[in-house]
Image (spheres, rainbow, N blue to C red):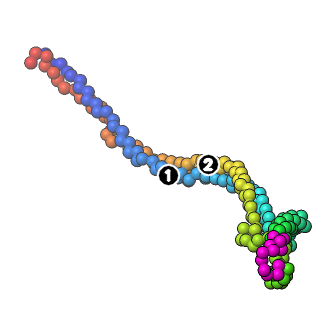
Amino acid sequence: MELLRLSIRSTQGQIGIESPRGKHNITSPPGQLDIVSPRADLQIRQPQGELSIDSSAAWFALAKGGTLETSRMLTAQYEQRIMQTIGKLAQEGNRMKQISNSSNAIADLAAQAMTNKQDYLRVSGRASNMNVKIQYTPRPVEIETTPRHPEINYHVSKPEINYIPQRAKIYMEQMNSIKMWVSSYDLYA
């Protein structure tokens, strides 16, 4: 027996899409850094040192000393001169009492008194390089520092991003179709 057969063949449609990549433009400007560093506060104080000069011994050596020092010196010399004079008078008295000596004691003592030089009283001190006494007392330097902290500020600059999209190209790559036909068909063959 012959039958008819209906055959249907279809093809699917295919769409082609070409999508090129978009373009990115990214610009990142540098951030802004502000640094303010104030100067530290520095205070220096130098107190004056103390200088003391004692030149009284130098003035005394130049016979320009004070009245009290000159009086003490003359008093000490007078005491010494008195003791020397007493000793000399005692020697002269002993010389005069020597009867056994044939020479004239008074004439000898007078001649001796004429030839002896008499020492003058001294009114000045001894000269020395140590007569002027200098003493200096330094004062320490006072340094005070007050530090100042720097101020740091950073301003961030936002990046600039631009995206330029590309147009997608869409096209039909394969058209869809349906094909139908009828053929004869033998069931027992």
Q: Is residue 98 magenta?
A: yes
Relative to the observer, which residue lies in front, 165 or 105? Answer: 105
Residue at numbered disc 2: 154
**Label 2: element kind:** strand
Q: Is residue 117 magenta?
A: no
Relative to the observer, which residue lies in front, 177 or 170? Answer: 170
Relative to the observer, which residue lies in front, 92 or 65? Answer: 92
Left or right: 62 with respect to 167?
right
The residue sitting at 82% across, 79% down in the picture is 105
Dividing the picture into quadrants, the one containing residue 134 is bottom right
Relative to the observer, which residue lies in front, 95 or 44? Answer: 95
**Contact check, label 2 and label 1, Cβ < 8 Å:** no
Q: Which residues are magenta?
A: 93-105
> On the rendered image, what quadrant is the C terminus found in?
top left
User: Would you say residue 59 is visible in this rendering?
Assistant: no
> What's the residue type where badge 1 is placed?
Asn
Residue at numbered disc 1: 25
Outermost residue on the right side: it is 67
Crowding at dot 2, Cα within 10 Å, few <14 / some 14-19 / many 20+, comes out as: few
Q: Position of residue 110 (x, y in %)?
A: 85, 82
The residue sitting at 59% across, 49% down in the picture is 157
